[in-house]
Image (cartoon, grey):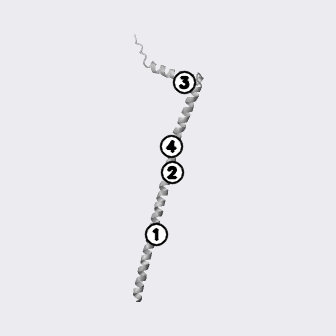
Amino acid sequence: MRSEMETIDETEEATTSSEELNQLIQQIQQELTVEDKRNLDTLAYFKQKIKEEEARPRKQHQLLEARLLQAITQTEGSTADSDYWLNIGRFQRKKNQGSLPKKRRL
């Protein structure tokens, strides 16, 4: 009788430890899922921050260009405006000088 009782006890213990093992496996799988989600969320956050940092100089440049254009338009007839047109005139003259006909030797 005793051997039958011992066999039953061992079977119950094996079943119990198997159930506990399954619960432990499920718990670990859930923890892995939570950890994976946290990792993906962290990566997404930092990728977004990188995009923002890469865009910052471009936005700053656009803002400064807009301020420059605004300053130029507000100072119509000023020296800065005159210098701008003088520089364009010089550029056009140099461009045209290359197309002047060469003098012929006699």
Asked where in the image residue 76 lies, by quadrant, the reply is: top right
What kind of residue is marked 2?
A: Tyr
Q: Name the residue under label 1.
A: 24
Q: Tell me the element at label 4.
A: helix
Label 4 or label 2, whichever comes before in sequence order: 2
Q: In this view, does 19 lie to the left or right of 52?
A: left
The residue lying at 48 percent from left, 56 percent from top is 39
Cα–Cα gap, marks 1 and 4: 45 Å
Q: How far apart are marks 3 and 1 (CA)?
A: 77 Å
Cα distance in 3D space between marks 2 and 1: 31 Å
Task: Measure how far apart labels 4 and 2 are at the Cα level.
Answer: 14 Å
Amino acid type, callout 4:
Glu
Q: Which mark is residue 45?
A: 2
Q: In this view, does 49 lie above or below 103?
A: below
Judging by the rendered image, the residue that carries numbered circle 4 is 54
**Residue with the mark numbered 3:** 84
Crowding at dot 3, Cα within 10 Å, few <14 / some 14-19 / many 20+, comes out as few
The CA span between labels 2 and 3 is: 45 Å
* Residue farthest along the bottom direction in this orientation: 1
Q: Are marks 4 and 2 in contact (CB under 8 Å)?
A: no
The answer to which of marks 4 and 3 sits earlier in the sequence is: 4
Secondary-structure class at tag 3:
helix
Tag count in the figure?
4
Residue 53's x, y, as percent?
52, 44
Q: Which of marks 1 and 4 is nearer the N terminus?
A: 1
* Label annotation for residue 2: none
Amino acid type at circle 3 is Tyr
